[in-house]
Amino acid sequence: MHKQLLPQPTSAFIAVTLLCNSRCIHCDIWKNKGLDFLPVDIYKKLPASLEMVDLTGGEPFLRNDLPEIVKVVRASCPKARILITTNGFLPEKIKKYTPAIVKNDPAIAFRLSLDGWGDTHEKVRGIPDAFGKVMKSVKILRECGVRDIGLTFTLMELNRKELKTVYTHCKKEGLSFSLNVVHDSPIYFGNNKMHLQPNPKLVKKDFEELFIKQMQSANPRDWGKAWFNRYSYEYMVNHRRPLPCGAGENFFYMDPFANIFMCQIKNWPIGNLQKQTFEQVWYSKAKEKLTPAALACNDCWIICTAKDAIKKNKLRVMGDIASFLSTGRPLPLG
């Protein structure tokens, strides 16, 4: 196929640093040492086709030039919804830099990690007053005029009893809610994390209740999340994706050294943006060789890589959603 006819990526997961001020039990990123900040100009090379850019880490607010990164990404990717994923443990820096970030992108979205209520979040994250810092950061973001704020809950055995509590808080406070189950990743989260997952039987009822509540929402976005969460449960049971992965087709991951990978789960590098143009990376022999493996991969089912697959297979997803809306019966969980 001629390269101009190949699909351009629509989503990117970009770690602006792997330095981190957390000590999470389900992630080893914080064990990285040394300076890894790319110059801001590197982000000018991102493709204009992107519709979603997740600026993450490590902890993005460890970079004092985060407002400048947002400005460059906004200019390079004019169609993109830009998202900053943060642990919320630097409320004073968030207060200092968010006004400039909002000025550079008034529609900027923030997602803060909250993996339990009160002391549970502190146990997961290994940081004193972890819960209080997140709550303070949410308040600061609102005061700075951020309209799109959400909490992301990573499910594991340690916090499984508080899934409902965090979701209920989000609904009460008008915050977006996202759910991921803990995963392995040799190039990102680290290996040997899957054992932290809960026994699916112990959370089946919670997933069923969450599905029904999200489907009863007036917001169609919540319906899509309900569908994703329903299959997150299935993934815990059978480790099979419900939809083929779009890594290297619709999606890519870039680390803080400008290495571009098919995704953040597999060690599948396809190029480097400091040494190549994006087109050279995207149409490389390395990507062409890895694409069949990506399509057949079942090593994750997480929201950042699933969004594009859901969008690509929207007729199936909409059919499942329509079935519930017409019958009121949730899709049976395995």
Image: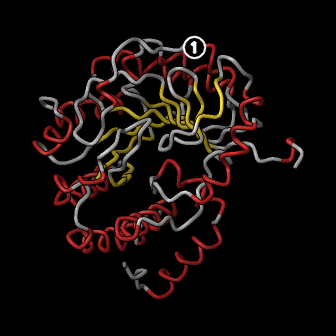
Q: Residue 46 vs residue 178: left or right?
A: right
Categorize mark 1 by other alpha carbons within 10 Å: few (<14), some (14-19), many (20+). some
> Please, what secondary structure does the residue beneath circle 1 have?
helix
Q: Which residue is mark 1?
A: 40
The residue positioned 57% from the left and 65% from the top of the image is 243
The residue positioned 60% from the left and 52% from the top of the image is 294
Q: How many numbered marks have been drawn onto this rendered protein structure?
A: 1
| Quarter occupied by residue 8 | top right
Residue 208, relative to residue 256: is it above or below? below
| Quarter occupied by residue 144 | top left
Residue 301, relative to residue 237: is it above or below? above
Give the color scheme: rainbow, by chain, secondary structure or one colour.
secondary structure
Percent across and percent down for residue 50 are 67, 38
The residue positioned 49% from the left and 31% from the top of the image is 55
Q: Residue 295 vs residue 235: left or right?
A: right
Percent across and percent down for residue 141 are 36, 30
Specify the amino acid type for callout 1: Val
Percent across and percent down for residue 287 are 69, 41
The residue positioned 65% from the left and 45% from the top of the image is 248
